[in-house]
Amino acid sequence: MLLAAVLSCGACSTAPLGDDDLTTGSITPRAASLREPRGSAPRGIAAGDWQQAKLALDQALASGERDISVPWENAQTGVRGTATPIGTARAGGCRDFMIAVVDGKTTDRWVQGEACRAEGGTVLNQVRVLGSA
């Protein structure tokens, strides 16, 4: 008898709980906004790929970690890589960086530059493609 009661209740824990769109009103939903560093794409890097790389770089810089590489990928093009701050921040809040760019069609490339913290966000300077990785 006890076994029959246990077996009949086995489905109780898998029953649906109802509406998945439950809103409690305690937190107002807002769209997430990522601050994209300012700086044009270097020659040979598509604007959409550069946008994803810059967001990864900003995340790496914001982490405050000394040895960090943040992966990035543009889901639309399949291009991917890593964004890595180099060394420590200098006076004025500037720090060198390297970004790897892998597209599977051409030789892997490295982009090098300087990221400087400014009042309105991060500004990228002296950005150039170094060539093969």
Image (spheres, rainbow, N blue to C red):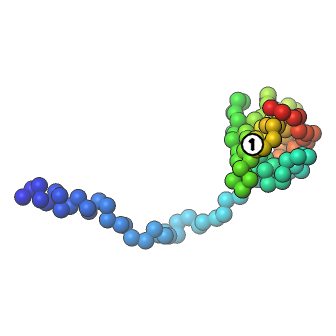
x then y, percent, for residue 7: 17, 58
Instruction: Name the side, left or right, on which 43 lies relative to 6.
Output: right
x then y, percent, for residue 95: 83, 35
> Which residue has dot 1 on it?
104
Mark 1 residue element: loop
What is the quadrant of the N terminus in the image?
bottom left
- Residue, x 32% and y 65% (percent of image)? 15
- Residue, x 12% and y 59% (percent of image)? 4
Q: Nearer the viewer, residue 123 or 111?
A: 111
- Residue 132 in view in this figure: yes
Q: Nearer the viewer, residue 96 or 101?
A: 101
Q: Nearer the viewer, residue 76 or 66?
A: 76
Tell me where residue 72 sits by quadrant: top right
What is the quadrant of the C terminus in the image?
top right
Q: Is 75 drawn above or below residue 101 in the view shown? A: below
Instruction: Name the side, left or right, on which 69 lies relative to 110.
Output: left
- Residue, x 26% and y 62% (percent of image)? 12
Instruction: Point out the residue furthest to the left here.
Output: 1
Q: Is 18 drawn above or below residue 87 in the view shown? A: below
x then y, percent, for residue 77: 74, 53
- Residue, x 91% and y 39% (percent of image)? 128
